[in-house]
Image (tube, rainbow, N blue to C red):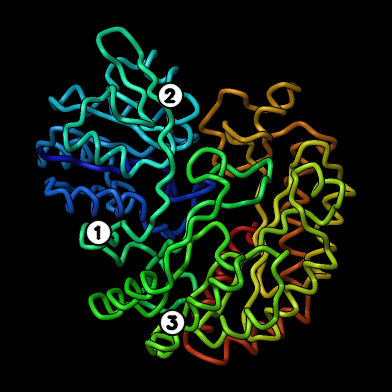
Amino acid sequence: MKVVIANPPWPVENGYGCRTNSRWPHIRKDKHLAFPIYLAYSAAILEKNNIEVKVIDAVADELDNRSYVKAVEKQNPDICFIETSTPTINIDLESTKLLKENLDTRVFMMGAHATVFHREILQKNTFIDGIIRGEFEFTIRDIAIGRPLREIRGLTFRKNKEIIINPERPYEKNLDSLPFPAWHQFTLKYYDSFLNESPSMMMISSRGCPFQCTYCLWPDLMYGHIQRRRSPGNVCDEIGVLIERYGIREIKFDDDTFALNKKWVMDVCREIINRGYHREIVWNCFGHVSQGDPEMYRMMAKAGCKMISYGIESGSQKILDIMRKNIDMKKAKETISNAKKAGIDVYCDYMIGFPEETEEDIEKSIESALYLDPDFIQVSYTIPYPGTRMYKDALQKGILLYPNEWEKYCSCGPMIKNYVTPERMMYLYKKFWKRFYMRPRYMIKTAVRMMKSTQEFRRGAKGFVSFYKRFLRN
């Protein structure tokens, strides 16, 4: 049995499409790509089961459809597993059809968009053999080892002209049972760092998020609302391999919410310190502002944490309540202050373009960013991905700007009809970035930071160039 697992081409003029392992698939001008960690886990599980497997990252390798087909053809696989996303589904189907026209192979697709529209995709595209719904690594394994398709949970497949929908697959509870990702399948230099320590690598120490945000795709469709955590020892075993085998200096924990359970976080940090890894790596993670324990942040900093990201999303309590965000600004201020006092940089994510959002609500978001005063912010357009409660509500109310134009769902502009016109929304988007980053006090602080180290200088210079190209040029 020979298998190919693929992140297929995403053709972008003068840029790169970030599909794999992205909660919000988007287009970038620079080659800042996320490591395809779930594809790497899938490959490792197949290797553990003595299945010959090759991972092809067509985006990182800059392959067009023809080159991609040739790369797959070279492997002569019996089965291909193809990752998909909402903005790329049409081009994914196009490249997969080309694949099937040139190879005698079975093809299965996976990803959030395919999970939502599994029946429709199979009905309209007879060259697709099946859709893997939700968390996909063990379903891939079951198909590859030859289990009867009717017995494989989490699978929708075609038998003759009939579409068969198997029961849901339960989430894997024992994450320690997973082999470490198959890093050797990838050219690691293609995957950029976040803190400018190189080489870097992504890790997943837990899966699932207990929060109920209406816009968030992965908990609803892929990894669930119960946090499943690896043991601290298992997490640190992986860190040790990354240091010793690949010389990794920076780790990004890409868990939905790493800094949540204080006891577990403290135990992971103690294990990092006990093994001396805090002297060899730096790391960053995601948190939730409801968890603001100062002792936990001090321990994280001691263990090498340099940055934590929080999803603030809006400064309007009205909008926060609509999206079920479950935060308030006073608690957010306290948590961010505790993290910064511990010596951890804070990165806050915001979105604009929510249903029922007014210009006043967006101005409140801008003011909240100035009030919270994180070290960095990210501002994005709200994307109502299929499968989220936001999408279902917006579809029912008829307020989607592009109901079926999936290529628009790439964080490139406003997506929802509300009280602000798309043109005005784009103006406010730029205003948000400029108000935060062009404050004299912030610019002085950044200049001082850049003088601290080569890494800080590189990060500051890279950020300035990107900011200039997006908001100041022309």
Q: Is residue 464 above or below residue 136?
A: below
Q: Quadrant of the C terminus?
A: bottom right
Give the quadrant of residue 440: bottom right
Point out the residue furthest to the top here.
161
Question: Circle 1 sits on which residue?
Answer: 182
What percent of the width, then of the height, locates residue 181?
Answer: 29, 59
> Given contact means CB atoms under 8 Å apart, are the residues at marks 1 and 3 in contact?
no
| Amino acid, disc 2 | His
Q: From the viewer's perspective, is 94 left or right of 218?
A: left
Question: Circle 3 sits on which residue?
Answer: 271
Q: Earlier in the sequence, mark 1 or mark 3?
A: 1
Question: Circle 2 sits on which residue?
Answer: 118
Q: Residue at x 13, y 45 (%)?
A: 51
Closer to the camera in the image, 280 or 261:
261
Q: Secondary structure at mark 3?
A: helix
Q: Is residue 75 above or below residue 451?
A: above
